[in-house]
Image: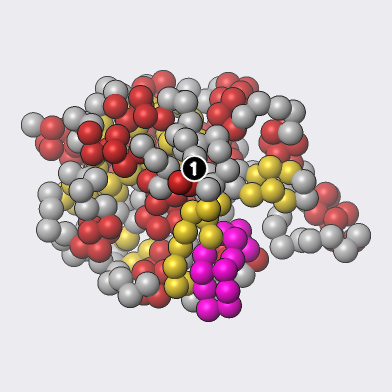
Amino acid sequence: MRVTVLTGGVGGAKLVLGLAQIIPPPSITAIVNTGDDFEHLGLPISPDIDTLLYTLSGKANAAQGWGRENESWAFMAALKSLGGPDWFNLGDGDLALHVMRLAGGGLSETTARFARAWGIGVRMLPMSDDRVSTMIDTDIGRLAFQTYFVERRCAPVVHHISFLGAAAARPAAGVIAALADADVILIAPSNPWLSVDPILAIPGIVEALRATKAPVVAVSPLVGGTAVKGPTAKLMLELAIPVTNASIAAHYDGLIDGLLIDGDDDAPDLPHARTGTLMTTLADRARVAQSALDFAATLRQ
């Protein structure tokens, strides 16, 4: 079975890790959001790719879900002592990834190299090797994603989201084939507007999803009628979108065949299945992944 996952953020990384517990990792392709990528202190930073790398290699900070476990912060302390910007934390170990990206090669090449070095069997593909930047129009003006998400802690009210550079970007090598050749396609419980939409904004990806013969299942990011963490529910309210699974289904209208939802949450008007989607433990992640595959199997039939 070949499974392709559209993913971004911590929730997406958890689902991919769950999949890797139940099917051979080489049969999994993760297409990763890079709309969050930016340059900071001269370093190219890819937060969603790094989160997936750390998660799949067992290096992720268990409490946070992002960053490295047992990280040290000597660089940040030295930076702050010099009056440098300290709003975006760069751990000493984390710096290695960003510095190594300066050594050459595109994002696809460096990502594959890091995955091999850490023994990760899952195939990881950035959505594009071209620069795409998620921009947030807010009540205090237009903000780059990391300024909104990290520096401003998602506090500004969001009016509109756009993806600078997406129209001219090309899918990374292997992305379209991974969608065309998949037996199952999953959309992770990532923020639909901030983590999945940048992927869908790359020309050719929506068309590939519509053309695939594989069942496409999205895992709702809502648990117990709200978002577990992150700004999903807040964002939906600010965009005048009801915080319901029906809204999630409507957002993916024409792209998905079914939605996996949590427990007794509201049911959308399309095929759906239920499970406890809160992924606290490794067993939870495997169970949610298995539920998504089982549901996809019923849609295929």
What's the coloring here?
Answer: secondary structure
Total marks shown come to 1
Q: Is residue 284 above or below residue 102?
A: below
In the displayed structure, 30 sits above or below 248; it is: above
Quadrant (top left, top right, bottom left, bottom right) of the C terminus: top left
Residue at horizontal 47%, vertical 26%? 173
Residue 139 magenta-drawn? yes
Give the magenta part as a residue range. 136-147
Residue 58 appears at what percent x and percent y?
A: 55, 35
Task: Locate residue 14: give its quadrant.
Answer: top left
Report the front residue among 194 and 280.
Answer: 194
Q: Is mark 1 on a helix, strand or loop?
A: helix
Q: Specify the farthest residue to the bottom.
A: 139
Residue 224 in percent (x, y) is at 29, 65
Position of residue 162 in the picture relative to residue 81 (left or right)? left
Seen at 16% across and 50% down, the residue is 272
Residue 75 lies left or right of residue 116; in this view the side is right
Please give the residue where the numbered disc 1 appears in the rendered image. Answer: 168
Q: Is residue 194 left or right of residue 100?
A: left
Name the residue: 27% across, 47% down: 218
In front here: 165 or 76?
Answer: 165
- Residue found at the very far right of the displayed protein: 82
Instruction: Locate the N terminus and report the quarter of the image it occupies.
Output: top left
Query: How far across and how far down the image is residue 80, in percent?
Result: 85, 61
Does residue 268 appear in this view? yes
